[in-house]
Amino acid sequence: MKPEIVAPGHEVPILMASATGSGTWWGWSSGTSAATAWVSGSIAIFLEANPEMKRDGDQGGGTAISNLKMMISQNSEMKENQEDHDDHYGYGLLRLDLLINETQNSSSESGIRSSDLVSLRDIQIKYIQEFQATRRMTASVPPDNSTKDTE
């Protein structure tokens, strides 16, 4: 059943390289490319906190990917009044803090304190709000090779 989860994919702040290699600047991306980066980064952070879940870790191997997918689905935030898989929202919004919290509850080896998990969610929200406010006040300049008009 697709989608399995959803991730932020509308006006996500991203770092963009200039076409000439003379620097970088912040831009905004929407769509699956932005959501894919969010999910990939979340999985990388999760695996850093839980090295035993990596392919070559103690709980890795052939079932590691399916186990991680199941854990992500079980620890995603469903939309209001959603009780099961939805054809538009999947199992809900990827929540890295819930995923790490689940492994913290089942194992004391991760080294992440539950007080850190609450602040992680607060940081995500603050980060997005700050960049959205900046986005509204700043014109976006596309890369030199872009076909999109400037705002």
Image (cartoon, rainbow, N blue to C red):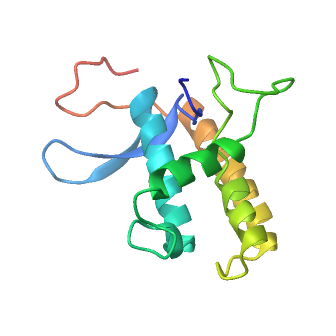
Q: Position of residue 139 (x, y in %)?
A: 45, 30
Give 148 or 86, whichever is nearer the viewer: 86
- Tell me what residue is drawn at x 43 percent, y 29 percent: 32
Q: Position of residue 11 (x, y in %)?
A: 52, 31
- The N terminus - image quarter: top right
**Residue 122 drawn above or below residue 147:** below
Give 59 or 22, whichever is nearer the viewer: 59
- Tell me what residue is drawn at x 54 percent, y 35 percent: 135
Q: Return the residue found at the far left.
A: 20
Q: Return the residue found at the far right.
A: 81
Q: Position of residue 111 (x, y in %)?
A: 67, 82
Q: Quadrant of residue 106?
A: bottom right
The count of marks equals 0
Left or right, 128 with reference to 142: right
Q: Return the residue found at the far front.
A: 62
**Residue 19 drawn above or below residue 6:** below
Left or right, 141 with reference to 86: left
- Tell me what residue is drawn at x 34 percent, y 21 percent: 150
- The C terminus - image quarter: top left
Give 98 or 139, whichever is nearer the viewer: 98
Left or right, 101 with reference to 7: right
Q: Quadrant of residue 31?
A: top left
- Tell me what residue is drawn at x 84 percent, y 26 percent: 80
Q: Position of residue 5 (x, y in %)?
A: 59, 34
